[in-house]
Image (spheres, helix red, strand yellow):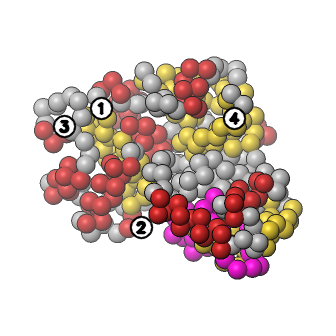
Amino acid sequence: MSTGFHPLTIAEIRRETADAISIRFDVPDALKPVFAFKPGQHLTLRADLDGQDVRRNYSLCVAPQEGELRVAIKRVAGGLFSSFANQGLAPGMVMQVMAPHGAFTWAFDADASNHYVGFAGGSGITPVLSLLKSALLAEPNSRFTLLYGNRDSASIIFLEELAALKDRFMQRLSILHFLEDEEEEVALFNGRLDRAKCAELLERRVIPAADIAAFFICGPGPMMDAVEHSLLESGVARDKVLLERFTIDRPDAAQAAASAARAEAAAGAKVVLVLDGRRRSISFDPALGNILENARAAGLPAPYACKAGVCATCRAKLVSGTVEMGANYGLTAAEVAAGYILTCQSVPVGTDVVVDYDG
């Protein structure tokens, strides 16, 4: 993955709901290989807002087969970047964009005959929609069931597109809407996708868990936790449950103290950083907290976005030595086993630590 940002021109802005837009970028031919993506991945967008270097991750809402680079941005209360995007962006403007990345994806196979299920809440539909369309386009013998929770019908992002997809793939796509503030005729579809609702769906075999190849889950934290726990309790194998978290709670006092203690224990440790083909040796400063902040303090343009262990923008490969990693919501078990770390959550343990951002 390219670790730098590239200037892309906004080709189109489409109003999806009262508080959500989608943005299509024009990708020059020279950059098309850089911006090739897998379904479910996201982009990091960068802007200077009131003198702040603000970076945010937004999921692609299109399938690779569609030939577009489009993300959706929902305005959140107090959201600096999302408010700017919904109010201040216009076609023709240029944004700084990082190459697609993220592990919330699936390798679809044209010869497969699978049944996939997506659970989405609010703006969590964005990467799930990318996966849904990819599954239907790439695997003509596969099916997809989407369970989508929202407050009311007016807040359903991509409502018209989902309806058009249902008409196009009538025999292979099922869409179930769950609304909190509107009542439908079928009581099962009223209310939140919480633990009780998920258990009922599984018990009634609305979701035949044993027959599903993969579950894709994205939305508010409580919804994701409820769905994940319900699936695992019903016997679904963990490797079939894929989650994409875009927010996490702030660490409590005990967690913060533990992080500070880890950093203090690493004071002065030598760390070799490899970035853009250059090697740089630094002495770890515990006051900066982690390898990412030490790298940037040394003048290296190490990539980052959330700094919370979620987006994996700061991912690098541990070539040698040992690190201790705090939160990890962005790396898969396979990536961890292959030696990848989140540098925003990692501190060196001992000496001879070599971290390769190019790996």
Q: Neighbour class for label 3 at 10 Å: few (<14), some, many (≥20)? A: some
- Residue 190's mark? 3
In front: label 4 or label 2: 4
The spot of residue 63 in percent (x, y) is 53, 42
Q: Are marks 1 and 2 in contact (CB under 8 Å)?
A: no
Q: Which residue is mark 4?
A: 52
**Which quarter of the picture shows residue 290?**
bottom right
Q: Disc 3 or 4, which lies upstream in sequence? A: 4
* Magenta region includes residue 350: yes
Asked whether residue 58 is drawn in magenta, I would say no
Q: CA distance from mark 4 to mark 1?
A: 33 Å
Query: Looking at the image, which residue is at 53% across and 42% down?
Result: 59
* Badge count: 4
Badge nearest the viewer, 2 or 3: 3
Q: What crowding class fits label 1: few (fewer than 14 Cα within 10 Å), some (14-19), or many (20 or more)?
A: some
State the CA–CA distance, disc 3 to disc 4: 42 Å
Q: Quadrant of the N terminus?
A: bottom right
Q: Would residue 295 be found to the left or right of residue 183 on screen?
A: right
Label 4 secondary element: strand
Which mark sits nearer the N-terminus, 4 or 1?
Answer: 4
Along the line of sight, the residue nearer the viewer: 220 or 66: 220
Which residue appears at 33% of the width and 58% of the height? 228
> What stretch of residues is rendered in magenta?
331-355
Q: Which mark is residue 151?
A: 1
Please state which amino acid type lies under the numbered disc 1.
Answer: Arg
Mark 3 against mark 4, which lies toward the viewer? 4
Q: Residue at x 67, y 77 (%)?
A: 349
